[in-house]
């Protein structure tokens, strides 16, 4: 049985014991089950699961922060008297090797307002990104490289 499935089953058992099936109880049961499984399995070889969940949370929080910043920036652009748009298409070189990682990165970029993943080269080494407002292409690439791509690589390829 996978560790994720066991953790979800422990969370459902927690909700059943409490008699409340709310998202808060599910989250609390999941965290409680995660901690319980971590304590019990400290000597086992299934440590990958216990590293992946914090990485997924870190990526989710980074995305949420970036989502809020992008929404505020796009709102200020739209509400300004002169829409100072600087659209551009950027060829972003990928360091990711797995298709799942590249697809996750492309989707995270597309979900962020003001950016859109357009295409991936046939050799899966270049991601073409459209941005509605671009000041410096190298700074934009470095932001993605040190932010999303690094976090996706930690999550998917390790």
Image: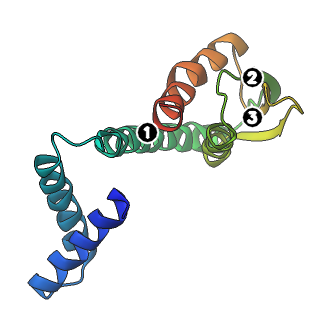
Q: Report if the CB atoms under discs 2 and 1 are less than 8 Å apart.
A: no
Q: Report if the CB atoms under discs 1 and 3 are less than 8 Å apart.
A: no
Identified at 15% across, 41% down, the residue is: 42
**Mark 2, secondary structure of its residue:** strand
Left or right, residue 28 beside residue 79: left
Q: Nearer the viewer, mark 2 or mark 3?
A: 2
On residue 92, the disc is 2
Identified at 21% across, 55% down, the residue is: 34
**Mark 1, secondary structure of its residue:** helix
Instruction: Please tell me whether residue 154 is drawn above or below residue 99 in the rendered image.
Output: above
Instruction: Please tell me whether residue 90 is drawn above or below residue 3 in the rendered image.
Output: above
Identified at 55% across, 38% down, the residue is: 70
Sequence order check: which comes first, mark 1 or mark 3? 1
Q: Where on the picture, by quarter, is residue 117?
A: top right
Identified at 14% across, 60% down, the residue is: 32
Q: Name the residue under label 3.
A: 132
Q: How many labels does the image show?
A: 3
Sequence order check: which comes first, mark 2 or mark 1? 1
On residue 59, the disc is 1
Left or right, residue 151 beside residue 117: left
The N terminus lies in quadrant: bottom left
The image position of residue 85, as x and y in percent, is: 76, 31
Within 10 Å of disc 3 (Cα), the crowding (few <14, some 14-19, many 20+) is some
């Amino acid at each position: 049985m996978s560790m994720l499935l066991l953790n979800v089953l422990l969370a459902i058992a927690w909700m059943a014991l409490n008699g409340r099936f709310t998202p808060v109880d599910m989250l609390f049961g999941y965290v409680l089950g995660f901690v319980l499984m971590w304590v019990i399995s400290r000597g086992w070889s299934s440590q990958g699961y216990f590293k992946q969940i914090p990485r997924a949370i870190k990526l989710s929080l980074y995305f949420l922060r970036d989502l809020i910043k992008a929404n505020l920036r796009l709102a200020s652009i739209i509400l300004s008297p002169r829409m100072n748009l600087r659209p551009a298409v950027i060829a972003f070189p990928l360091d990711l090797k797995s298709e799942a990682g590249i697809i996750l990165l492309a989707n995270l970029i597309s979900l962020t307002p003001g950016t859109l993943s357009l295409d991936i080269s046939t050799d899966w080494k270049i991601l073409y990104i459209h941005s509605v407002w671009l000041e410096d292409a190298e700074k934009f690439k470095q932001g993605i490289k040190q932010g999303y791509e690094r976090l996706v690589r930690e999550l998917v390829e390790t």
